[in-house]
Amino acid sequence: MSAPKGGTGRRIVLWRHGQTSWNLERRFQGSTDIELTEAGVHQARRAARLLAALRPDAIVASDLKRTAATAAELAALTGLSVAHDAALRETYAGEWQGLTHDEIVARFGEQYAAWKRGEPVRRGGGELETEVADRAAPVILEHADKLPQDGTLVVVSHGGTIRTAIGRLLGLEPHHWEGLGGVSNCCWSVLGQGARGWRLLEHNAGSLPEPVLGDDT
């Protein structure tokens, strides 16, 4: 996508879903369809009030229950419809799904360690992180391409998918994606479109992004 000739450029807000019971149990969700807890719904409502102030132009979300419910809170405030796409689902992780963190380390210790080292690993026989980026990033760009010149797209997705999509959109090598760090429940990261592509403006934020005022804008 070519950079705009003027204005502040397009923005992509990548928003993680609210809390689930499996989050509390440190249980790997992956593509398992888990609903928000009551606290997760409240998180989504609070975050939606903040994100609505950005006056988004479009919302696209994973089709799983936890992301759909999170996106619905922003849609209710903005009047926007939500486009749902399975390509924005969390990483499918095969045998890891449903296991707690401790169970994964105990049963798949070397696989877990290799993943944390940044090596390409099919966790539990599931997807590679690059395959997640392969399916998610094009969908994000497709929707971003439809924005007005200074428009804002909100993408409601999952922690792993958000991290890998950011890595791909920034042009980082996959072994560096782990360095981005995770995204907390109902927090978000913001990409801005610049002259040389997408830039990371905010990461794992829980308040409205502030403009960068200085020599590196």
Image (cartoon, rainbow, N blue to C red):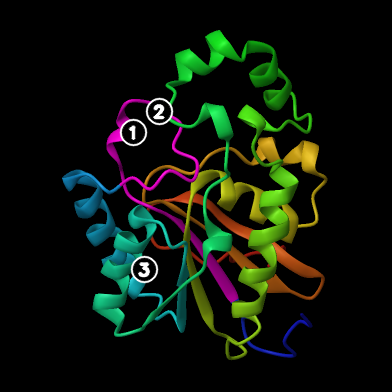
Going from N to C along the chain, the mark reached first, 3 or 1, is: 1
Classify mark 2: helix, strand or loop. Answer: loop
For image coordinates 55% across by 60% down, the residue present is 88
- Disc 3 crowd, CA 10 A, few/some/many (<14, 14-19, 20+): many
Per the rendering, the mark at residue 51 is: 3
Q: For mark 2, what is the residue?
A: 27
Q: Residue 133 carries which label?
A: none
Give the secondary structure at mark 3: helix
- Is residue 21 in the magenta section? yes
Residue that mark 1 sits on = 22
Q: In which quarter of the image is residue 201?
A: bottom right
Q: Looking at the image, is mark 3 or mark 1 nearer the viewer?
A: 1
The answer to whether mark 3 and mark 1 are in CB contact below 8 A is no
Question: Going by the image, does 149 lie left or right of 38?
Answer: right
Q: Which amino acid does the dot numbered 2 rest on?
A: Arg
Distance Cα–Cα, label 2 vs label 1: 5 Å
Q: Does the residue at mark 2 contact the one at mark 1 (Cβ under 8 Å)?
A: yes
The N terminus: image quadrant? bottom right
Residue shown at 47%/14% (left/top)? 103
